Image (cartoon, helix red, strand yellow):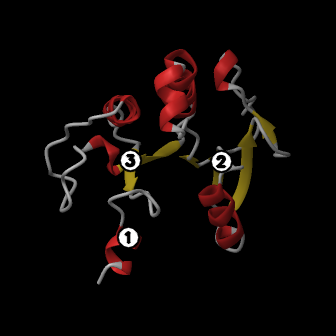
Amino acid sequence: MTKVLVVGSSSTIAEHFCQESVQAFDVVTASSSKISDLKIDFLNFQLPDISGKQLTHAIIFSSATDIKQIEEDFYSAKALTLSGPIKLINKLNQEGVKCMVISTTAVFDEVSTETTEKSNTSPSTTYGHLKLELERLTLENPLNAVMRITKVFSGNSILNKWKDL
């Protein structure tokens, strides 16, 4: 069975993934803020001990997400969103683990409404710049993939467009 490490498992979307995936995958959770199988602390660059876990895949959900806090504390935002995840991804790749990073449409400018994976990136926030660099570094290894998702409740979101129809 595929053994998946879910990093940032305390986030809402990661919790949902874990609940929905329990039948398909053997899930190992990693988080700093809630009870999980493995502890991780990107702020202090403490990576989990993955030896003997026989992981095949990892999904990286963790990231700083509060835009105001990111602008106020760049060091912590960079550790949570870029530096820590990349160190973990590199460690996992050395073990042959395939990694997927959950990214965001914030890698595009704020006015773009129709984007694809081939659209030009042009982030207008620090968060978008950090995520774009995370994507770039992640994709340097062919084992890895990036999935961009839309903030459902942001000002220019799918949900707001639907509500206004």
Residue indicated by mark 3: 145
Q: Residues within 10 Å of mark 2 (few under 14, many from 20)?
A: many
Q: Earlier in the sequence, mark 3 or mark 1?
A: 3
Give SS at disc 3: strand
Q: What residue type is labelled 2?
A: Leu
Quarter of the N terminus within the rendering: bottom right
* Residue drawn at the location 32% of the way across and 59% of the way down: 156
Q: Relative to 50, is 119 above or below?
A: below
Q: Which amino acid does label 3 sit on?
A: Ala
Residue indicated by mark 2: 5
Residue indicated by mark 1: 160
Give the mark toward the camera: 1 or 2.
1
Q: In this view, does 37 lie to the left or right of 11?
A: right
Residue 81 position, x and y percent, is: 51, 31
Q: Do the residues labelled 1 and 2 touch (CB within 8 Å)?
A: no
Give SS at disc 1: helix
Q: Relative to 90, is 33 above or below?
A: below
Asked which quadrant contains residue 42, the reply is top right
Residue 103 position, x and y percent, is: 41, 46
Q: Are marks 2 and 3 in contact (CB under 8 Å)?
A: no
